[in-house]
Image (tube, rainbow, N blue to C red):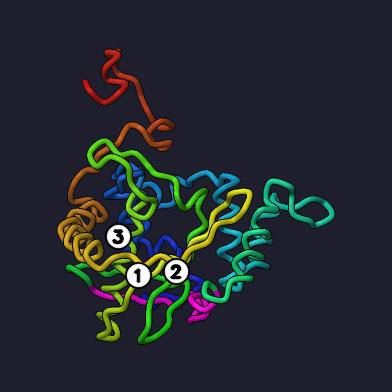
């Protein structure tokens, strides 16, 4: 199928193509465990992640720069009072937008083609990507609205880590760069245009190192075959037993020991 803005997120498109978000559902990141069963349920429309206030604040900012804010407002009426003003818990979104627009460098990186859709055959699978800001011949830019840009995240195997690797944005950089390369022959640098939700909004343009990208694309290649087999039902999915989907669908079969609560059993 040919992807458009209207069908990009459809169940049919999600079945036919792999996206970065779908890949991270199947394979996880350092900050989010993989859950193959949840990923399949989400792909089939049987599970939808909760729309939290922080998530909606970020989506509001995203939609503003996409040029789809009015559509977002229509789809999320709970953000507004009866007088059609933003509820207090969501007003930070307007503050973030104002702060971004005051910075010339930030806006320069956000000045590319908005929501440009690319598809490509990678590693035996069809992939899709929608770019926040694509500047042909120059760079790929993705807008991220984070709780904090400088908070260190702890991982058991690697210790403290920045948000870029913790949430798998280096995976996104690798896939987007490869998809653009297949389409254009240009291997462009990947930047994150980042803003925080703190009282005073922090902003940065962050380049993802090419060595990280090179490492992640090798991982993506090695995991793609399994994702395809899961999507067509050739192998059974594994549950993570810790995500909201697994909690919602859990069926107890026997008592457990205390150390199993920490995954040590």
Q: CA distance from mark 1 to mark 3?
A: 14 Å
- The one nearer the camera, 126 or 57, is 57
From the top left corner, tell me how far across and down residue 237 is, in percent: 25, 43
From the top left corner, tell me how far across and down residue 234 is, in percent: 18, 51
Q: Residue furthest right?
A: 83
The numbered mark, 1 or 3, whose residue comes first in the sequence reads: 1
The numbered mark, 3 or 2, whose residue comes first in the sequence reads: 2
Q: CA distance from mark 3 to mark 2?
A: 20 Å
Q: How many marks?
A: 3
**For residue 131, which quarter of the picture?**
bottom left
Instruction: Say which residue label 1 marks.
Output: 128
Q: On the rendered image, what quadrant is the C terminus found in?
A: top left
Q: Residue at x 22, y 58 (%)?
A: 228
Above or below — where is 20 with respect to 154?
Answer: below
> Mark 2 or 1, which is nearer the eye?
1
Instruction: Say which residue label 3 marks.
Output: 171
Q: On the rendered image, what quadrant is the N terminus found in?
A: bottom left
Badge 2 density bin: few <14, some 14–19, many ≥20, Cα 10 Å: some
**Do labels 1 and 3 touch, CB within 8 Å?**
no
Q: Which residues are magenta?
A: 107-121
Query: Residue 110 magenta-drawn?
Result: yes
From the top left corner, tell me how far across and down residue 225 is, in percent: 17, 58
Q: Residue at x 52, y 57 (%)?
A: 145
Q: Residue at x 38, y 42 (%)?
A: 153
Q: CA distance from mark 2 to mark 1?
A: 9 Å
Task: Specify whether 64 is left or right of 188.
Answer: right
From the top left corner, tell me how far across and down residue 199 is, in percent: 63, 49
**Which element type, helix, strand or loop, lies under badge 3?**
helix
Kindly identify which numbered label has been placed on residue 49: none
**Do labels 2 and 1 touch, CB within 8 Å?**
yes
The numbered mark, 2 or 1, whose residue comes first in the sequence reads: 2
Kindly identify which numbered label has been placed on residue 8: 2
């Amino acid at each position: 199928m040919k992807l458009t803005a209207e069908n990009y997120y459809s169940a049919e498109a999600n079945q036919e193509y792999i996206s970065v978000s779908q890949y991270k559902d199947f394979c996880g990141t350092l900050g989010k465990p993989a859950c193959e069963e949840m990923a399949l349920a989400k792909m089939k429309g049987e599970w939808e992640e909760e729309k939290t206030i922080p998530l909606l604040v970020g989506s509001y900012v995203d939609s503003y720069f996409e040029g789809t804010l009015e559509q977002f407002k229509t789809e999320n009426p709970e953000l507004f009072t009866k007088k059609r003003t933003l509820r207090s818990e969501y007003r930070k979104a307007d503050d973030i937008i104002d702060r971004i627009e005051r910075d010339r460098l930030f806006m320069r990186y956000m000045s590319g083609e908005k929501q440009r859709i690319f598809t490509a055959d990678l590693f035996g699978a069809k992939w899709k990507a929608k770019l926040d800001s694509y500047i042909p011949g120059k760079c790929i830019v993705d807008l991220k609205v984070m709780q904090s840009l400088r908070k260190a995240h702890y991982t058991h195997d690697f210790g403290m880590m920045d948000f870029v690797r913790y949430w798998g944005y280096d995976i996104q950089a690798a896939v987007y760069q490869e998809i653009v390369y297949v389409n254009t022959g240009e291997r462009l640098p990947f930047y994150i245009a980042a803003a925080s939700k703190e009282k005073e909004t922090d902003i940065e343009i962050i380049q993802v190192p090419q060595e990280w990208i090179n490492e992640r694309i090798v991982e993506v290649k090695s995991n793609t075959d399994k994702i395809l087999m899961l999507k067509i039902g050739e192998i059974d999915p594994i549950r993570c037993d810790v995500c909201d989907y697994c909690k919602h669908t859990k069926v107890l079969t026997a008592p457990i020991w205390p150390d199993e609560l920490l995954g040590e059993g």
